[in-house]
Image: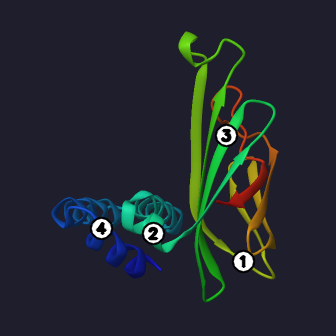
């Protein structure tokens, strides 16, 4: 998964910058002393590679607009061997509006097991569920104490554009 995203990233953008980032990632990975650190390092790097132009090109990209002021983007790469890389980001525009600076944004990414179109990304007391409804649509649910920026939610129906 990582090698496919890396190859796509270096084809689309300044390969030197991507390679430098990969070297910094390798150094941080080498400083890990436990499995949780290694997993987080991989999730972070895969999330970064998914946001590159090449990563977005090889991923499935979907969007949502909720009536509560949240707009979201979901990118999914895979599944490969039962795993999928997911990255979901949301922006909340509050009642004061963008001109007044009433805007908050947050994101979460990681690698999840995906079985029969269902998967879950969990961190601390927050759980983000991913359900493939059809080839064009995914439902994202959110439960627990997610510590996203004020007003930001990841949940919604995401559609391919």
Report the side of 28 relative to 156 (left or right): left
Question: Regarding mark 1 in the picture, which secondary structure is present there?
Answer: loop
**What SS does tag 3 mark?**
strand
Q: Earlier in the sequence, mark 4 or mark 3?
A: 4
Label 1, on which residue? 114
What mark, if any, has residue 99 been given in the picture?
none
The local crowd at label 4, few if under 14, some if 14 to 19, many if 20 or more residues have their Cα within 10 Å, is few
Q: Residues within 10 Å of mark 2 (few under 14, many from 20)?
A: some
Residue corresponding to mark 2: 57
Which of label 4 and label 1 is nearer to you? 4
Q: Position of residue 76 (x, y in %)?
A: 60, 68
Residue 115: percent from left, percent from top: 77, 81
Residue 10 visible within the image: yes
Specify which label sits upstream in the sequence, 1 or 3.
3
Can you name the residue that lies furthest to the bottom here? Answer: 81
CB atoms of marks 4 and 2 within 8 Å = yes
Write down the residue under mark 4. 12
Residue at 72% across / 77% down in the picture?
A: 114
Residue 112: quarter of image: bottom right
Tell me what residue is drawn at x 72 percent, y 40 percent: 146
Q: CA distance from mark 2 to mark 1?
A: 21 Å
Q: Secondary structure at mark 2?
A: helix
């Amino acid at each position: 998964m990582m090698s496919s995203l890396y190859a796509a990233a270096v084809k689309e953008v300044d390969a030197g910058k991507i390679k430098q980032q990969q070297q910094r990632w390798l150094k941080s990975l080498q400083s890990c002393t436990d499995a949780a650190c290694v997993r987080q390092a991989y999730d972070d790097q895969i999330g970064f590679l998914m946001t590159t132009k090449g990563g977005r090109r090889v991923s499935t990209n979907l969007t949502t607009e909720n009536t509560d002021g949240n707009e979201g983007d979901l990118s999914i790469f895979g599944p490969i061997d039962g795993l999928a890389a997911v990255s979901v980001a949301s922006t909340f525009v509050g009642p004061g509006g963008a001109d007044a600076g009433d805007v908050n944004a947050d994101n979460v990414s990681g690698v999840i097991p995906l079985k029969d179109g269902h998967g879950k990304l969990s961190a601390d007391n927050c759980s983000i569920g991913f359900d493939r409804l059809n080839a064009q649509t995914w439902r994202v649910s959110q439960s627990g104490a997610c510590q996203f920026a004020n007003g930001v939610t990841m949940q919604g129906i995401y559609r391919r554009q």
